[in-house]
Image: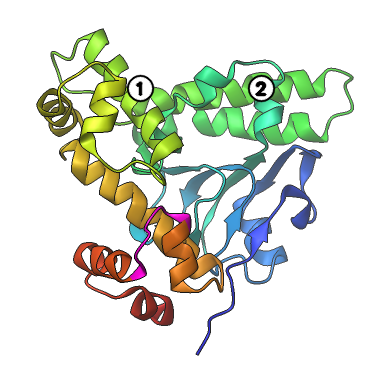
Amino acid sequence: MKTAPVPVYCIDSYPEGHGHDAFHAQRLEDVIAGFSGIDNAHTHDFYLLLYVTAGTGTHTVDFVTYPVHAGSLFLLAPGQMHSWNLSADCQGYLLFFEAGFYLHRYPSSRLHAYPFFKPLHAPVVELPAGGGTFPVLLEHVLQEAESRFDNRLEVLRACLYVLLEMAARYARPEPAGSSPRQVRQLHQFEELLEQHFRTEKTVQAYAQWLNLTPNHLNALCRRHRGHTASDLIQQRVVVEAQRLLVHSRQPVKQIAAELGFQDASYFGRFFRKRTGLTPDQFRENR
């Protein structure tokens, strides 16, 4: 039995929002009440910020399920698949924005540096109790989005920047004693991995691009991410394979080719070793 592809939403898919074509702000409870099927698995072509102020539940992002409670902050990049199961009393805020909205004022290097938007990082940030000024600023965003001031988009853009910078403060810190050079090398590896994981899957290649030895790169990744570089490469390939298996009706052979596997049988063995399921079994179970 073939499964239907997961829907991909754009910002104008959401009714009753406040903001702009490239920016949308709304209360979580209003989105839940006004958008049928929003709790089912879907993906977006924009960035998402979800902050929960009341209620409980679960939020599944790229096949990993996280608990939801008051104070939960989730940040998703375009292409990430998610669904949630929230209690009836859940409240909070949702912000959606396209990359161009942020990049109109701020550099792409900063947007791409936020750890929570990277595929191999957890998309959840634990804020201090009460959220500090986070909920206050989100409430201001809703008010500003409804205003008619000529410069409201600049104010919204500035608020978005502050929210992301505040979230970055509480994202998973690098280990104590990490040098700026080590952190920079790790981020460069992650950027290279995102660019090349479909065509290059060897630690040796990434190490060469970074002027490191494979052992040095593995040690760097193990210290900062808890996994070797080889593990991280394989994790990224598996996440993309899972997305493609669920997002589309492409044959497994075509997905294997898209991910750089010349042999679909080898891809099947690789996928099963990492997930415990064959590609077809994974697709049917979703």
Query: Looking at the image, which residue sits at the far bottom?
Result: 1
Give the number of the mark in front: 2 or 1: 1
What residue is disc 1 on?
188
Q: Distance from label 2 to label 1 (Cα)?
A: 21 Å
- Amino acid bearing label 2: Leu
Q: Would you identify the image quadrant in which residue 185 lies?
A: top left
Q: In the image, 90: left or right of 205?
A: right
Q: Would you identify the image quadrant in which residue 138 lies?
A: top right
Query: Looking at the image, which residue sits at the far top?
Result: 180
Residue 87 visible in rendering: no
The residue lying at 74 percent from left, 33 percent from top is 143
Instruction: Based on the picture, tell me whether residue 270 belongs to the magenta stretch.
Output: no
Q: In the image, 263: left or right of 9?
A: left
The relative height of residue 198 versus residue 142 in the rendered view (above or below) is below
In percent of width and height, residue 140 lies at 67, 29
The residue lying at 35 percent from left, 22 percent from top is 188
In percent of width and height, residue 4 lies at 59, 78
In percent of width and height, residue 167 lies at 44, 28
Magenta range is 258-264
In percent of width and height, residue 98 lies at 68, 37
Main secondary structure along the magenta-highlighted residues? loop
Q: How is the image coloured?
A: rainbow
The residue lying at 19 percent from left, 31 percent from top is 221
What residue is disc 2 on?
103
